[in-house]
Amino acid sequence: MMLEGKSGPYFSSLDSSIEILKKRAQELIENINESRQKDHALMTNFRDSLKIKVSDLTEKLEERMYQLYNHHNKIIQEKLQEFTQKMAKISHLETELKQVCHTVETVYKDFQDLCVQPEV
């Protein structure tokens, strides 16, 4: 048995097996790395696609939100216009009521003056 030079068929077969294992391990590592690169590319594409879809959805949501704002603004504007008109009517009625109260007060004083006149 020759152990020093490793020249026997056993060691040559062992060396061959080790080389095959090294080569196979290297291939597995390369396959894993390729798979990781593909996964990374897939995730990048997915992220980009998702960004586009989220952006589109956000734009649609924003557009709808502004439509609702415009709709509500019109309703609020109409209600404010009605409120302004009613407040003007209330102010007018208040003025009329003050005039009526003043007239009633004047009539009451005149009536009192008539009732309290000394006999001549």
Image (cartoon, grey):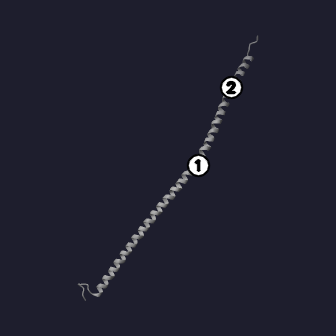
Q: Nearer the viewer, residue 103 or 30?
A: 30
Residue 62 at x, y percent in the picture: 54, 51
Q: For mark 2, give the secondary structure.
A: helix
- Relative placement, left or right, of 41 versus 5 is right
Q: For mark 1, give the secondary structure.
A: helix
Hey, which quadrant is residue 36 in on the image?
bottom left
Q: Residue furthest left?
A: 4
Residue drawn at x 63%, y 41% is 78
- Relative placement, left or right, of 24 versus 87 is left
Q: Total of numbered circles in the picture?
A: 2
- Report crowding for label 2: few under 14, some 14 to 19, many 20 or more residues within 10 A (C-alpha): few
Of the 4 image quadrants, the one containing the C terminus is top right
Q: Residue furthest top?
A: 120
* Residue at image mark 1: 68
Residue 26 at x, y percent in the picture: 35, 75
Q: Amino acid at mark 2?
A: Gln
Residue drawn at x 70%, y 23% is 103
Q: Nearer the viewer, residue 73 or 86?
A: 73
> Where 93 falls versus 46 (above or below)?
above
